[in-house]
Image (tube, rainbow, N blue to C red):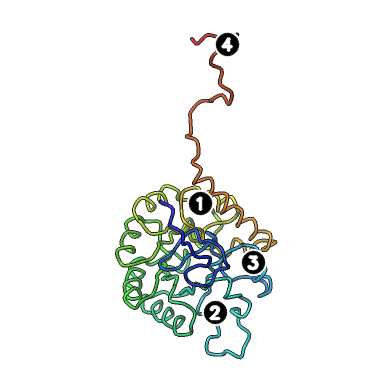
């Protein structure tokens, strides 16, 4: 995919990123880091805050259903997030119908979180795979209502194209089941999706460790979203730092262009013209 254009301003267009050139965009939002992190499963809110800071992420997803939006006097994980440094990405985690996802997205916007929304509509409790039919329905409705929709989807390039046609600002295919840590099981499908759409492609779900994040970025995706891989690590802060470096390295490797794979060896030092070199047979 081609590199998204950057802005000449010193702040992201949404006004929530620290003064520094953004490198990629989703809809009208611009970001510096290509690592997106979640806020669930941490042992404490303070540990979550430290891990997010170590990750360098400036887009952070929060499950609307986990927030005490109607009880502002109670402790809330939003209090631990510096909204001058990060952009919130509300998500519809836990929704199993299009209607429920639409309702939760509206609730998040009415609470002042964002018109940016990660739409999840789960179709199966065991695998947590998306219900793509319901996802398409929810995407169409929310786009009409002015949301910037980031849909969590399967690795089907046909579904990805339909989501873009429905107005999605990006597509977020899974690399493996949510929270499984199995890594990038479907590189070919991810490549097919990259070839099929012109919007950003973000790998969402399945990353287990830093090498998985690097592999995803080397495929050419625009970003990687993760939660369990960091929050569930023995040292979440150190893992967050590792993921940050892996995403940066993977993107740099993709931009640099890897050498082609060959069946046989190729000498690092050319031997043409070297005295005493054995004659070719």
Q: Secondary structure at mark 4?
A: loop
Mark 3 to mark 1: distance in Å? 21 Å
Q: Nearer the viewer, residue 213 or 87?
A: 87
Question: Residue at position x 48%, y 28% from top?
Answer: 263
**CB atoms at circles 3 and 2 under 8 Å apart?**
no
Give the residue number, with chain letter if any, for mark 4: 277
Q: How many angstroms separate mark 3 from mark 2 (CA)?
A: 21 Å
Q: Which residue is mark 2?
A: 66
Is residue 193 or residue 276 the one in the foreground?
276
Choose the circle earlier in sequence order: 3 or 2: 3
Residue 239 position, x and y percent, is 65, 59
- Count neighbours of disc 2 (C-alpha within 10 A) and say few if under 14, some if 14 to 19, many if 20 or more: few
CB of mark 3 within 8 Å of CB of mark 1?
no
Of the image marks 3 and 1, the number of the one nearer the N terminus: 3
Of mark 4 and mark 1, the one earlier in the sequence is 1
Q: Which residue is mark 3?
A: 53
At mark 2, the secondary structure is helix
The one nearer the camera, 182 or 18, is: 18
The extreme front residue here reads: 8
Residue 75, quarter of picture? bottom right
Q: Is residue 254 above or below residue 43?
A: above
Q: Secondary structure at mark 3?
A: helix
Spatial distance from mark 4 to mark 1, Cα to Cα? 41 Å
Q: CA distance from mark 4 to mark 2?
A: 70 Å
Residue at 40% across / 71% down in the picture? Answer: 148
Residue at the disc numbered 1: 217
């Amino acid at each position: 995919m081609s590199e998204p254009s950057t802005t000449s301003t010193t702040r992201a267009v949404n006004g929530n990123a620290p003064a520094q050139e953004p490198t990629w965009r989703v809809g009208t939002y611009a970001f510096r880091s290509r690592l997106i992190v979640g806020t669930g499963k941490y042992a404490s809110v303070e540990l979550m805050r430290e891990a997010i800071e170590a990750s360098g992420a400036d887009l952070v997803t929060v499950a609307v259903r986990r927030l005490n939006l109607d009880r502002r006097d109670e402790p809330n994980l939003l209090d631990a997030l510096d909204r001058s440094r990060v952009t919130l990405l509300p998500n519809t985690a836990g929704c199993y119908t299009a209607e429920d996802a639409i309702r939760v997205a509206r609730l998040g916007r009415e609470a002042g979180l964002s018109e940016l929304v990660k739409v999840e509509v789960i179709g199966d409790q065991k695998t947590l795979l998306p219900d793509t039919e319901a996802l398409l329905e929810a995407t169409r409705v929310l786009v009409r209502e002015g949301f910037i929709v980031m849909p969590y989807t399967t690795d089907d390039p046909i579904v990805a194209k339909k989501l873009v046609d429905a107005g999605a600002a990006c597509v977020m295919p899974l690399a493996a089941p949510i929270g499984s840590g199995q890594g990038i099981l479907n590189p070919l499908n991810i490549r097919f999706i990259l070839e099929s759409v012109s919007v950003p492609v973000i790998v969402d779900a399945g990353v287990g460790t830093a090498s998985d994040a690097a592999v995803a970025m080397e495929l050419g995706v625009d970003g990687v979203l993760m939660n369990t891989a960091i929050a569930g690590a023995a040292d979440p802060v150190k893992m967050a730092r590792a993921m940050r470096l892996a995403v940066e390295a993977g993107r740099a490797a993709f931009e640099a262009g890897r050498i082609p794979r060959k069946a046989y060896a190729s000498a690092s030092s050319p031997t043409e013209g070297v005295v005493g070199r054995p004659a070719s047979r």
